[in-house]
Image (spheres, coloured by chain):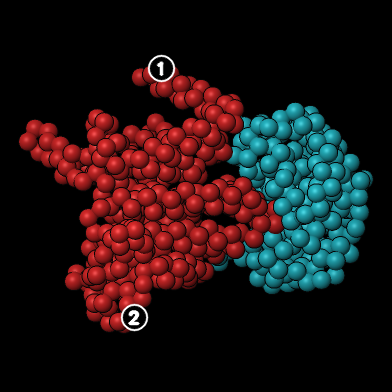
Chain colours: A red, B cyan
Amino acid sequence: MTTVLERVRSGREAAGERWRGAPRWVRWALLVAVIAFFYALPNREFYQYLGPIPTPGANFTQVLFTVSIYVLLAVGLNIVVGFAGLLDLGYFGFFAVGAYTVAVLTSPSSNLKTLWPWLLVVPLAIGLTMLSGVMLGTPTLRLRGDYLAIVTLGFAEMIRIAAVSSEFLKGQRGFNQIPHPPGKYADGKPFFGVLDARPYYWLVLTLIILVVIGVRNLTHSRVGRAWISIREDEDAAQLMGVPTFKFKLWAFASGAAIAGLAGALFAGKQNFVNSQNFELLNSIIILAAVIFGGSGNIVGAIVGGGLVAYMIERFRGIELFGVELYEYRFLIFGLVLVVMMIFRPEGLIPNRRRAAEFKDRRKEVIVGE
Amino acid sequence: MLLEIDDVSLLYGRIQALHGISLTVAEGEIVALIGANGAGKSTTMRAISGIRPIATGSIRFEGEDISKLRADLRVRRGLCQAPEGRGIFPGMSVLENLDMGAYTRRDRAGIAEDLARVLDLFPRLAERRKQAGGTLSGGEQQMLAVGRALMSRPKLLLLDEPSMGLAPMLIQQIFDIIKEINEQGTTVLLVEQNAQQALARAHRAYVLETGKIVKTGTGAELLHDPAVKEAYLGVA
């Protein structure tokens, strides 16, 4: 058992070494190929040759859109959990704030009757989510430890309950006829229609790429170094002159802003938003996805978010001994997570630093015994 | 006076850890704070660096009251602490750790100069510059913590138990380096359980017992004080 594990581990490390050792142009070419693959993926002409990859039980293009939203959320949550080391259990609450901002300001079923166009509301939704992040973070980020986890958990539930029971937010009835993003073909047909999910997927994919570039630049700057130092040792960070509260709030607010963006995209695609979209389970799934992929690593977060969201949909329509696997998706997901935490707590594709931190912590435990 | 602490008390919840401590550090000095486990040495350090808020009294640095100042702003004023034990960043390399020490500074030339100086003081760190901090031995981590604090070019360097858990030879070495740092112009306030070594090198020292200062004098005086000898130097 261990020898197999060792062999897998050394194999992956060799792959990592080869990647880091490869010339710049090879890495760029590979990156471009991967991006091109994902742009081509939702076309039936392409994915019909991909064997078992397309989902049998659901429209593959729709699934890809869902997956892309999860990836965007994972990239955002990774800033909060992975870089700054803040445990956020209610991340989906910010997604809800983004989606509801769009719904309230654009839908004809809203009491406000503002009927603004989608594109105008997106920056507003991002701003408002960021503001809610600052409001939530200001009192709680001064404290250490579990407070933040509990408060964020409560926040997500508050948003959900407000959505269910407030007259203004329409509960189960929800908001309909939320406008789509703008854009028309030459023949006058709208680019973002009702049936075809591909344009939405491409839009989210493009935004993911932009967000990843932004986050990467941020993490390679003084801001990123401050976040990592806070995650590794908050006291030591403060002793080195890092204004820890400010940077924690920054991480929290940037993470929230990305969730707000994802929420606005979701509302613009779905055309309909009601209280059923925002179960607590979603927050947990995204958090688990980030940890599963390797928190602290952008690639890890992308892979984690993508894989988890995809696998859940992949189970649809598969029958085993007369039961649909989809019914047991969370059981399987939970088992996989437990196994992961035993054998590879740092995630599928961990950050090199993060792996060293884990080793350090393990050593500390041994010393403590 | 570079640092003046006047009648400071500090609470951990309902437990009072410091009972009206007063001490001073003049420019150019090495001042040692000795005492047994739980006497409040590290707590005093935390109060000075601003990690724990104080309940009463005042802390003055270069004549200005910094009692209510945030910890990171105290660093900018020239007060830097090397935390005790494993207070380094385990996932960052040695160089990245040292770089974090210079977080508050923007003068690239000065930072490069100090980096060369720190690597010169600690050749072991130079050898392991690319290695992750968490993979270093206890002694090397201790050196890294001291070196990192030096990178902020502090006016006052606070050292919390720099010899903790080290082999006797390494202890000797680290105290020699502290002496050297001081001779290069940095004022040092040192907290130690290893009273022998600390007193031998300090200009002045304070003895701390259950959150109160019970004795003060020059290093040599305390080294030969019968009560101190019996309590902290293991000599009957």
Horizontal side, residue B170 vs residue A222: left or right: right
Q: What's the residue at 36%, 76% (across, down)?
A: A116
Q: Is residue A109 visible?
A: yes
Horizontal side, residue A107 vs residue B176: left or right: left
- Of residue A344 and residue B207, the one placed in the foreground of this image is A344
Residue that carries the numbered disc 2 in the rendered image: A114
Q: Secondary structure at mark 2?
A: loop
Q: Secondary structure at mark 1?
A: helix
Neighbour tally class for label 2: few under 14, some 14-19, many 20 plus, Cα within 10 Å: few
Q: What's the residue at 89%, 59% (across, down)?
A: B26
The chain containing the residue under callout 1 comes to: A
- Of residue A304 and residue A61, the one placed in the foreground of this image is A61
**Mark sitting on residue A3:** 1
Q: What's the residue at 41%, 61% (across, down)?
A: A261
The chain containing the residue under callout 2 comes to: A
Neighbour tally class for label 1: few under 14, some 14-19, many 20 plus, Cα within 10 Å: few
The image position of residue A34, as x and y in percent, is: 43, 36
- Of residue A43 and residue B47, the one placed in the foreground of this image is A43
Residue pushed farthest top?
A3
Rendered-image quadrant of the C terminus of chain B: top right
Residue pushed farthest bottom?
A112
Residue pushed farthest left?
A322
Q: Earlier in the sequence, mark 2 or mark 1?
A: 1
The image position of residue A324, as x and y in percent, is: 12, 40
Q: Amino acid at mark 2?
A: Thr
Q: Is residue A85 visible?
A: no
How many labels, in total? 2
Mark 2–mark 1 Cα distance, whole angstroms, equals 64 Å
Rendered-image quadrant of the N terminus of chain B: bottom right
The image position of residue B125, as x and y in percent, is: 75, 33
